[in-house]
Amino acid sequence: MSFEKLNLIEPILKALQTEGYTHPTPIQAQSIPLVLDGRDLLGCAQTGTGKTAAFAIPIIQLLHEEHRNPKAPRPIKCLILTPTRELAIQIGESFSAYGRNTSLRHTVIFGGVNQHSQVQALKAGVDVLIATPGRLLDLMNQRYIDLRHLSLFVLDEADRMLDMGFIHDVKKVIAVLPAKRQSLFFSATMPPDVAKLADTILRTPAKVEVTPVSSTAEKVEQAVYFVDKPDKKALLQHVLEDESIASALVFTRTKHGADKVVKDLVKVGIKAEAIHGNKSQNARQRALTNFKSGETRVLVATDIAARGIDIDELSHVINYELPNIPETYVHRIGRTGRAGASGKALSFCDAEEKEFLRDINKLIGLKVPVVENHPYPLIGNGTPSPEPERRQGGGRSGGRPQGNRPAGDRRGNPHATDRRNESRSPGNDRRQGDNRRPTASATRDKRRD
Ligand code: AMP
């Protein structure tokens, strides 16, 4: 299947060529014809599957084909609602890339920054508005945004939107949208509350679904190092002696942990920066730009900060700490295997994390190969080999005390952990688009942080 077969217009085909895309990904091949046909869409797909282009490309085509007097004012025709500023920025970049040969205008609005330039862009007129819910409502309340002429609506990462406590904001937005519209709804998972929300938004939607979470793992080369917790710092430096690791995304469970890893690496002359919820928007963007350009070799991130990051050709993911939710592991390592590319994922597992590794092995249906010879072998606790077969009970959380899991985790929701592990700061209120309401479990985690 080629893009030509999808009846795309020349300006888009040319833009895709410029991007170096030769074939549509499965979600694109399924979604593009349906959206061009005017159908509502319920898409079950996670980041990394090419889902942004799956909605951006047909939207650009539909709007480009609308005849319009170039001198007439530009009402907003399409709203894309997404939970975080990182995702919003990336969607904006996608519209710039795929729409480069059209005259469509878009803008991105999110909280945590001054609204002035966003208001100026809105006043100039845009066809497509990409927004996080808090800032969107703020600017709507200030009457800078009029959605009465909207014909297309996209709700991106709906499960995450709900996890982050945005359900009321989302409902408020939906309430003011014209009833006659085409709606696209994307979510990585489809728990009942998300399906219920989809029901209220969509009309006889076509359903598309790609890549169940566990199969992402297959194309990534994986390895695990058993190591005592205090030795992880030295092991990371040892691993990074391998110069074939041009760039690595290192995951830690907490923001404090991310800062500590950066400090330790910088001390030994390895260029590293951290990206997490305590950093300002500018600092995050700078860290990301430096990493993308190769200026920094190592980017250290927490799960929630990393989720929206879109980096082409990332060669290595290093799990400095293993996540306690196995789906989070798959999300992490999936960052190296984007759109068919292959990559490597290395994990550091201490004695306490062995049970997490068992759950991961079970979810991905294979045993992550163990690196036997390295200078910092685990001596702290028992034999290093995890044996999934020995587990009792068979459930994903078997062997792990249930009391360690917050209610959200029991649903098997991969994002629940992410939310818990990002603590809140006073300047980080919910209106900033990427932020969460404090919860009892969050407070607990903040103490741990
Ligand atoms: P997404 O799932 O939208 O976050 O996209 C994941 C990555 O795949 C992004 O870096 C896109 O630039 C890239 N991508 C999307 N579609 C294609 C395609 N058809 N061919 C190659 N790369 C793609």
Image (tube, rainbow, N blue to C red):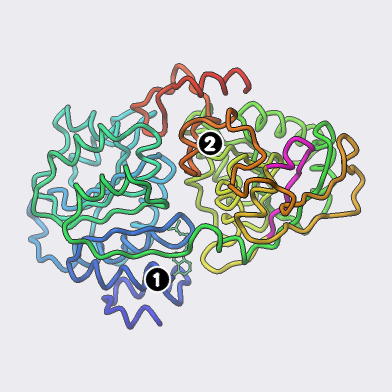
Along the viewing direction, whichever of 304 and 201 lies nearer the viewer: 201
Residue at the (63%, 21%) spot, across then down? 448
**N-terminal label among 1 and 2:** 1
Determine which of the numbered discs, if any, sits on residue 16 in the image: 1
Above or below, 117 against 127 in this view is above
Look at the numbered disc 1 and give the secondary structure of its residue.
Answer: helix
What kind of residue is marked 2?
A: Thr
Task: Please give left or right for residue 70 compared with residue 79 in the image.
Answer: left
Q: Which residue was labeled with disc 2? A: 417
User: For the C terminus, which image quadrant?
Assistant: top right
Residue 203 % position (x, y)? 16, 57
Above or below, 27 against 273 in this view is below
What kind of residue is marked 1?
A: Leu
Figure quadrant of residue 122: top left
Determine which of the numbered discs, if any, sits on residue 94 in the image: none
Residue 401 % position (x, y)? 63, 32
**What crowding class fits label 1: few (fewer than 14 Cα within 10 Å), some (14-19), or many (20 or more)?**
many
Residue at the (16%, 48%) spot, across then down? 76
Q: Is mark 1 within 8 Å of ligand 1?
A: yes
User: For the N terminus, which image quadrant?
Assistant: bottom left
**The residue stretch that appears in magenta:** 344-355
Task: Please give left or right for residue 5 compared with residue 63 in the image.
Answer: right
